[in-house]
Image (tube, grey):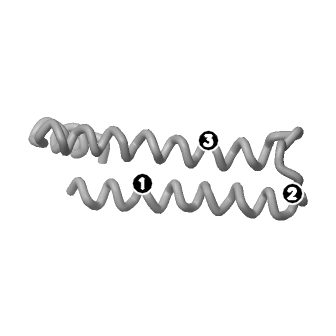
Amino acid sequence: MLKSILINLQKKSLKERFLLVLGILFFLVYLVLGLFIIFMKEFPIAMDTNYRIAFGIILIVYAFFRFTRLINDNN
């Protein structure tokens, strides 16, 4: 799968490559943000632990949803 992404990356225009990199960057941002929200002990927003974990899981699921759309759009 990664090999096909790299081959398709060479065929893309500069704009398409930029958007691919931006998509991967935002996938990582949502993933890391979800993990921070779940595992951060001193969370700056007053939020119940169960809601904080649920919000973190939603962000992680959304990150993988964006990643699958990014992969499918590149093929």
Q: Identify the mark nearer the N-term, 3 or 1.
A: 3
Residue 23 in the figure: left or right of residue 39: left
Identify the secondary structure beneath mark 1: helix
Q: Quadrant of the C terminus?
A: bottom left
How dense is the environment of label 3, judged by Cα within 10 Å: few (below 14), some, or many (20 and up)?
Answer: some
Mark earlier in primary sequence (1, 2): 2
- The image shows a total of numbered marks equal to 3
Q: In this image, 9 relative to 25: left or right?
A: left
Real-space Cα distance between discs 2 and 3?
A: 19 Å
Q: Horizontal placement of 54 versus 19: left or right?
A: right
> Which residue corresponds to mark 3?
32
Residue at (43% x, 58% y) in the render:
66
**Residue occupying image coordinates x 19% and y 45%:** 16
Instruction: Give the percent coordinates (x, y) of residue 40.
Output: 81, 40
Residue type marked 3: Val
- Measured along the vertical axis of the image, is residue 31 above or below residue 72? above
The secondary structure type at the circle numbered 3 is: helix
Sequence order check, earlier mark of 2 and 3 = 3
Residue, disc 1: 67
* Displayed quadrant of residue 20: top left
Residue pictured at 64% horizontal, 44% vertical: 33
Tell me where residue 12 sits by quadrant.
top left
Front tag of 2 and 3: 2
- For the residue marked with disc 1, what is the amino acid? Phe
Residue 7 or residue 28, whichever sits in front = 28
User: What crowding class fits label 1: few (fewer than 14 Cα within 10 Å), some (14-19), or many (20 or more)?
Assistant: some
Disc nearest the viewer among 1 and 2: 2
For label 2, the residue is: 47
